[in-house]
Image (spheres, rainbow, N blue to C red):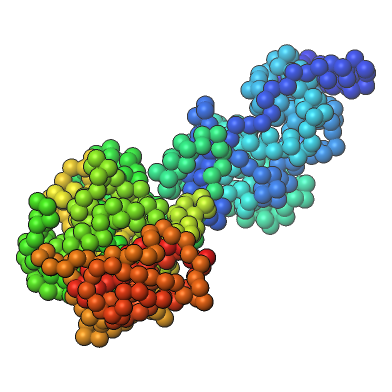
């Protein structure tokens, strides 16, 4: 700035504001856009930053609340840049006179005399400052800003636009990039550097020009001492603090989830999630380590949810988001894949709910054909009579297909829908193979299904944005859900897995394309998927070998020990095989039985009934006495030889009413009690 120009600015400033013409000149100022475009941010449950995105021009400009800025930074900023900020009206004549006087004495510009408001005017228009026209526009815009904005609003604009080096713009971007921390708590040295940087962000970059950065920082500290903002002792300690040696990367946790939320609502600038940031970071490390020993193209996905609230606490869509060879950009928590054996617990839970079977009911593991479908066990061996408990624990195929035939594949799909789970099958025509993974589910869908089991059979919607919770739909009975947890938690497991009481199930899809492990304790549901994002086989992977160890590692990050599973509900039938009612001792749906299966003549399926004296009339046709009646899997009348019964049922609400005859054949209806 020349001496002539500096004096001209002084004279101009002194003439502005006193006349009607000047006021009209300022009032007619055309203002630029005052609302800064800020980065899209995705926040964790505690408000910390999970991920941010650059604005349209590629700059990092994060939203900042002036009230949440360290007080020492604000005090240093005003002491260094504009001591009379709260007293002038946009242009400070005293500062311009001082700048002019310094220019006269030194023969060059020593200070510019610009107020913070004038700096904001320059920043929001990115206008020139070394010309008469540029300075004049800056003064006019500063005066106009003071007419329409409060001082705090002007300060907020500075905090958003102050250049911090490279593509960093604004205090928060600078604080996170240079110090890895939010600007709410800064040391005196950090605050001073962030005050000094905007005046020459390239020349004072601490990673490239540490001497200049240190000198500028120390000048701010010295000025802060003179202004009595900090003590000399604090300044000495701050001068001894090391400068940052490199720019830090911005947080990039839960990238797949963040991308998904941003794509769903592009105009939303702030996404608040239920993600636990430390847990998310730890599980991303677990997933990265899980890639070791896997083929180059394989990937890993993990998810943790709260079965009570439906909140998703961690979501890892791939082991390495940036690895193109693993197609890390594909979110494998959402991809539809064959679930292998992980749906078997649902089949058993439905059979328990309907009174078709009990954990100690004997099932036949033997060769069988089902209309041309001849499934095999994984090891191609047959074990003869086995209990339902053992059949589920060792994941036999034949017994679960037989149960599915009795239930009907359509009912299995209906149960998935009741759990809020999207499942697809070829041609939308479910067959018996759906029980063995003959369909497509996502990892999130499986976690949601197991969350329903973990919360006592009641459906729960999962959400990473706090919109989850109970759905009001029953998937299986409370007693059946408890039996499943008890069975899965006591299943034999390889010696390399911890002896924790976790209810979990593994699965391996056809052709070794997917390896799964899904499980729960008393407070969490965890899902693990391992495979290739392109669906190609990964020879030799099994759920128990590659997914289950990761499942236990995830639970190891959730606490010192798993949370205990709930105790048995009062109505749970915890009996040995020999003490079961006769119809439950052996599953009876066998070919060649000479008598007709039972059918419920009343009530009809879907009926709404009002109990009379607390009882509901039920009538059965066909079938062989004695009959055992169940309501939501709980026996309410055992060994009855009558075809008409008055049943005392709990209401109001929905009830699955079923009856099993002497041969183990069953009939069931769903009714609503008012």
Q: Vertical placement of 124 versus 253: above or below?
A: above
Left or right: where 202 falls relative to 561: right
Residue 131 in the image: x percent, y percent? Answer: 70, 15
> Which one is nearer the viewer's eye here, 82 or 499?
499
Whether residue 254 appears in this view of the structure is yes
69 to 387, vertically: above or below: above
Q: Is residue 141 left or right of residue 11?
A: left
Residue ID at (33%, 39%)? 329
Q: How many numbered marks have been drawn onto this rendered protein structure?
A: 0
Q: Quadrant of the N terminus?
A: top right
Q: Residue at x 76, y 22 (%)?
A: 141
- Give residue 211's position: percent from left, percent from top: 54, 39
Instruction: Answer left or right for 222 relative to 589.
Output: right
Q: Residue at x 52, y 26 (%)?
A: 57
Residue closer to the observer: 497 or 130: 497
Answer with left or right where residue 538 lies relative to residue 77.
Answer: left
The quarter of the displayed image where residue 152 is located: top right
Q: Is residue 498 above or below residue 221?
A: below
**Front one among 57 and 352:** 352
Rendering coords of residue 485 (x, y %) = 33, 71
- Judge whether residue 289 can be spotted in this image: no
Where residue 391 sits, quadrant-wise, is: bottom left
* Near-viewer residue (290 or 361): 361
Which residue is farthest bottom? Answer: 579
x then y, percent, for residue 443: 33, 52
**Above or below: residue 218 compared with residue 570:** above
Residue at the image point whose x is 42% and y is 62% from the top:
671
């Amino acid at each position: 700035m020349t001496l002539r120009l500096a004096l001209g600015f002084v004279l101009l400033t002194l003439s502005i504001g006193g006349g009607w013409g000047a006021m009209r000149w300022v009032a007619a100022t055309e203002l630029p856009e005052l609302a800064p475009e800020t980065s899209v941010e995705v926040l964790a449950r505690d408000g910390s930053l999970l991920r941010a995105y650059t604005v349209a021009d590629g700059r990092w400009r994060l939203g900042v609340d002036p009230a949440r800025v360290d007080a020492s930074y604000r005090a240093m900023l005003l002491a260094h840049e504009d001591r009379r900020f709260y007293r002038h009206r946009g242009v400070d004549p005293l500062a311009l006179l001082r700048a002019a006087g310094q220019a006269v004495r030194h023969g060059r510009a020593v200070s510019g005399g610009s107020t913070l408001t004038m700096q904001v005017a320059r920043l929001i228009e990115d206008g020139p400052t070394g010309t008469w026209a540029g300075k004049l526009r800056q003064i006019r815009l500063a005066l106009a800003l003071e007419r329409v904005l409060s001082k705090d609003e002007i300060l907020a604009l500075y905090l958003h636009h102050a250049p911090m080096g490279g593509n960093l713009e604004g205090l928060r971007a600078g604080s996170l990039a240079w110090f890895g921390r939010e600007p709410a708590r800064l040391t005196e040295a950090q605050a001073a550097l962030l005050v000094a940087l905007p005046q020459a962000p390239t020349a004072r970059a601490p990673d490239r020009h540490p001497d200049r950065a240190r000198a500028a920082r120390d000048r701010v500290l010295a000025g802060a001492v003179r202004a009595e903002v900090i003590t000399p002792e604090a300044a000495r300690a701050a001068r001894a603090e090391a400068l940052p040696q490199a720019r830090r990367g911005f947080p990039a946790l839960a990238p797949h989830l963040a991308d998904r939320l941003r794509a769903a609502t592009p105009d939303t600038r702030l996404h608040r999630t239920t993600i636990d940031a430390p847990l998310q970071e730890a599980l991303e490390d677990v997933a990265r380590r899980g890639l070791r020993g896997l083929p180059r193209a394989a990937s890993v996905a993990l998810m943790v949810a709260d079965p009570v609230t439906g909140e998703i606490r961690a979501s890892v869509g791939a082991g390495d988001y940036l690895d193109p060879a693993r197609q890390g950009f594909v979110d494998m928590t959402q991809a539809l894949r064959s679930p292998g054996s992980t749906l078997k617990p649902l089949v058993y839970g439905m059979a328990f709910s309907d009174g078709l079977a009990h954990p100690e009911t004997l099932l036949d593991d033997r060769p069988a054909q089902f209309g041309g479908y001849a499934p095999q066990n994984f090891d191609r061996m047959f074990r003869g009579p086995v209990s339902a408990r053992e059949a589920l624990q060792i994941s036999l195929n034949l017994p679960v297909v037989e149960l599915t035939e009795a239930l009907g594949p359509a009912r299995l799909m209906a149960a998935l829908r009741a759990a809020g789970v999207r499942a697809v099958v070829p041609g939308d025509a479910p067959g018996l193979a759906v029980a063995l993974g003959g369909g497509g589910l996502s990892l999130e869908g499986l976690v949601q299904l197991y969350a329903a089991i973990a919360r006592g059979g009641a459906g729960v919607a999962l959400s990473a944005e706090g919109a989850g919770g109970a759905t009001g739909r029953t998937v299986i009975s409370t007693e059946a859900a408890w039996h499943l947890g008890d069975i899965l938690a006591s299943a034999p497991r390889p010696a390399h897995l911890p002896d924790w009481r976790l209810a979990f199930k593994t699965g391996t899809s056809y052709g070794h394309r997917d390896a799964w492990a899904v499980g729960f304790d008393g407070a969490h549901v965890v899902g693990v998927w391992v495979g290739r994002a392109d669906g190609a086989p990964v020879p030799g992977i099994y759920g128990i070998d590659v997914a289950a160890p990761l499942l236990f590692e995830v639970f190891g990050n959730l606490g010192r020990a798993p949370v205990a599973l709930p105790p048995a509900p009062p109505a749970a039938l915890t009996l040995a095989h020999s003490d079961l009612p006769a119809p439950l001792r052996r599953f009876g749906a066998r070919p060649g039985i000479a008598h007709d299966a039972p059918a419920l003549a009343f009530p009809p399926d879907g009926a709404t009934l009002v109990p009379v004296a607390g009882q509901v009339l039920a009538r059965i046709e066909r079938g062989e006495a004695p009959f055992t009646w169940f309501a939501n899997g709980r026996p309410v009348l055992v060994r009855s030889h009558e075809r008409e019964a008055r049943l005392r049922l709990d209401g109001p609400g929905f009830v699955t009413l079923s009856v099993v005859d002497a041969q183990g054949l069953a009939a069931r209806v769903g009714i609503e009690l008012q």
